[in-house]
Amino acid sequence: MIKQSIQSITAVCLLVVIFYASTAMGHGRVAMAEDPCARHVGGNMVHLSAYQPQYDQKEQYCTEIPIAGDTYFVVDLVDQPLRGMPVSLKIFRGDDNEGETVAQVMADYHPDGVISGIGKLDKGLYSVVVTAEGIPPLQYAYQLRVDMIDYGKVARAWAGPLIAVLFLSWLMYRLIQSGRWRQWLGSRNQ
């Protein structure tokens, strides 16, 4: 009976951990002002989306690209003033402008508010810079991590469930050690 109870509690804890971790990983449906894929400069906003349809038809990424390979970039010029000025897109390896350019869209007007490009990304760090050539020029920057594990994010996602499992384990240990568990089982068997 004790073995079945412990197995049940373990199964419940495992389900809690799985469901908690899956909801904590994505940025989901948040307001545009709080979206980590949006950048604000000079009262204007752009939004970056990255896609890898060869691996997942529906998934949209921002700064964490899960697999190296061809990646489609879409920048939405959210605010109307950006659509009336030349805007360029540059994707390069590393975190400074000296890195190898992977993809580039030259400065042009985008009245529909969409800039798109494709780049073949290998494992590593990349930068995306969107430059609006207004007065003054506006520059929006993103750091991309391709095919890399962000251990800090993983630790934050698993901290809550791990604490819950440890607390429940401690509680079960204390309950078994106190002898109340045996008394409760004895009253149920009579």
Image (spheres, grey):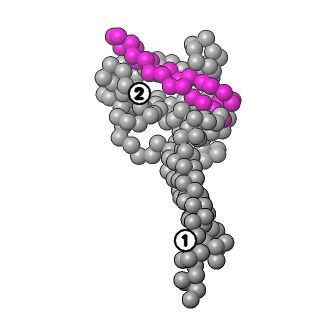
Residue type, mark 2 in image: Arg
Closer to the camera in the image, 119 or 9: 9
Determine whether, in the image, residue 100 is placed left or right of residue 140. Answer: right
Query: Which residue sits at x=64%, y=68%?
Result: 7
Q: Give the number of callouts.
A: 2
Mark 1 residue element: helix
Name the residue tied to disc 1. 180
Determine if residue 83 is in view.
Answer: no
The picture places residue 144, in percent across and down from the top left corner, at: 57, 28
Quarter of the view holding residue 94 = top right
Mark 2 burial class by Cα count in 10 Å: few <14, some 14-19, many 20+: many
The picture places residue 186, in percent across and down from the top left corner, at: 58, 81
Determine whether, in the image, residue 22 is placed left or right of residue 30. Answer: right
Residue type, mark 1 in image: Arg
Name the residue tied to disc 2. 39
Distance CA(mark 1)–CA(mark 2)? 57 Å
Mark 1 burial class by Cα count in 10 Å: few <14, some 14-19, many 20+: few
Query: Which residue sits at x=50%, y=25%?
Result: 142
- Outermost residue on the front side: it is 178
Query: Which residue sits at x=54%, y=40%?
Result: 156
Task: Verify whether residue 54 appears in magenta.
Answer: no
Determine whether, in the image, residue 172 is placed left or right of residue 42. Answer: right
Give the numbered dot on residue 97: none
Mark 2 residue element: strand
- Magenta segment boundaries in residue numbering: 121-147
The picture places residue 17, in percent across and down from the top left corner, at: 56, 55
Query: Taking 120 as reference, is 1 above or below it?
Result: below
First in residue order: circle 1 vs circle 2: 2
Quadrant containing the N terminus is bottom right
Closer to the camera in the image, 19 or 163: 163
Query: Taking 11 as reference, is 56 above or below it?
Result: above
